[in-house]
Amino acid sequence: MQFGIFTVSDITTDPTTGRTPSEAERIQAVLTIARKAEEVGLDVFALGEHHNPPFFSSSPTTTLAYVAAQTQRLQLSTSTTLITTNDPVKIAEDYAMLQHLAGGRVDLMLGRGNTGPVYPWFGQDIRNGIPLAVENYALLRRLWDDEVVDWSGRFRTPLQGFTSTPRPLDGVAPFVWHGSIRSPQIAEQAAYYGDGFFSNHIFWPKEHTQRMVEFYRSRFEHHGHGSADQAIVGLGGQVFMRRNSQDAVEEFRPYFDDAPVYGHGPSLEDFSRETPLTVGSPQQVIERTLGFRDYVGDYQRQLFLVDHAGLPLKTVLEQLDILGEEVVPVLRKEFAALKPAHVPDAPTHAARVAARQNTPEEVSA
């Protein structure tokens, strides 16, 4: 099982000091956070895509390429890549290039995005969000799978004899996760292609996440990719930890209360009770995270949000130390002990290349 962190790249005022970091400071902080993630033994660093304030990450491939050059084993991903407003041709090119630069240590999470004004900025209509996601991904798959592509659709000009370059590394495209909070159509898309399904698992009660994952698993099996419990599932989550749970609550409360996404709403206690947000001791985070398996089954990737809402860099790095030293080693051991042998590990480039080289046709040849 893979453990890591994801960032939404927000630039938020620290409510305890009134100070807002500059874009340059925040960008450099995220690079430091990514390097720290590898240092403490995490597996994955994922970066979102946004095109509006208060976020900075309009070009995640640029940032991830820089991180790739400064790390050795960290798996790099997005959280998310906007399949609706990006041209599939550009996605195919950019992520194949990143895949080469990172030596295969890259995958991507596709999503529709939840910021309505982004659509017209890129010449699209939010009312076409689902059809755009379906058509654009179908084209992206063709661009990666086929050397020469002839294609026509509803939302972009046709392609005739087009070859996307560079070609995917070792002939194997980056693994794709389809990220969604509330759209069963996206879970269906992930299941249809046999891709991964990533449930953000931050804002909704566990019953909602359970329904979405169960739907994806059932459709994965329906489309013939394996049994339902072999479907590839990832979860998000947000944590804040201190040795003493009361200290964690006291320190995090002002950040929660002013957070740009969920601030000025339910209390920290209510939100923590109704969603997977865990603010407390490392042991509480371990117990809460292990409990996710009770309602989604064995899964392959767990990402935590740790740098949201104006938390200072020093605090974020402390959170990573706790994750790497006290939380993730226990989670690795416990999840591994529970996982049945027929449930696959998280996809990696090396494993997917090996699987392709050992297909039944080639073995029997």
Image: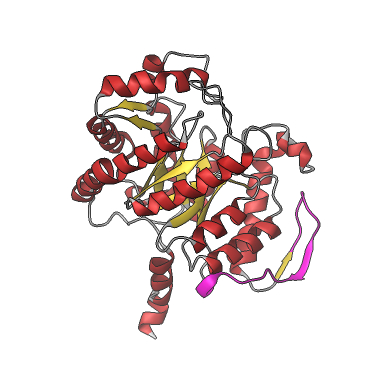
Q: Quadrant of residue 120?
A: top right
Vertical side of 46 occupied by 225: above or below:
below
Depth order, front residue of 315/249: 315
Residue 147 placement, left or right of 171: right
In the displayed image of the protein, which residue is found farthest to the left? 337
Q: Quadrant of residue 10?
A: top right
- The percent position of residue 163, horizontal first and vertical second, equals 70, 71
Q: Which residues are magenta?
A: 151-171
Depth order, front residue of 39/301: 39
Residue beneath the point at 55% across and 58% down: 66
Residue beneath the point at 43% across and 57% down: 75
Residue 8 placement, left or right of 365: right
Depth order, front residue of 122/70: 70
Q: Quadrant of residue 90?
A: bottom right
- The percent position of residue 26, horizontal first and vertical second, equals 56, 40
- The percent position of residue 133, horizontal first and vertical second, equals 64, 45
Vertical side of 285 occupied by 331: above or below:
below
Q: Is residue 9 visible?
A: yes
The C terminus is located in which quarter?
bottom left
Our reading of the magenta stretch's main secondary structure is loop
Residue 306 placement, left or right of 164: left
Residue beneath the point at 65% across and 45% down: 58
Residue beneath the point at 51% across and 49% down: 31
Q: Is residue 177 visible?
A: no
Vertical side of 337 occupied by 20: above or below:
above
Is 350 colored magenta in this rendering? no
Is 158 colored magenta in this rendering? yes
- The percent position of residue 100, horizontal first and vertical second, equals 55, 69
In the displayed image of the protein, which residue is found farthest to the bottom? 365
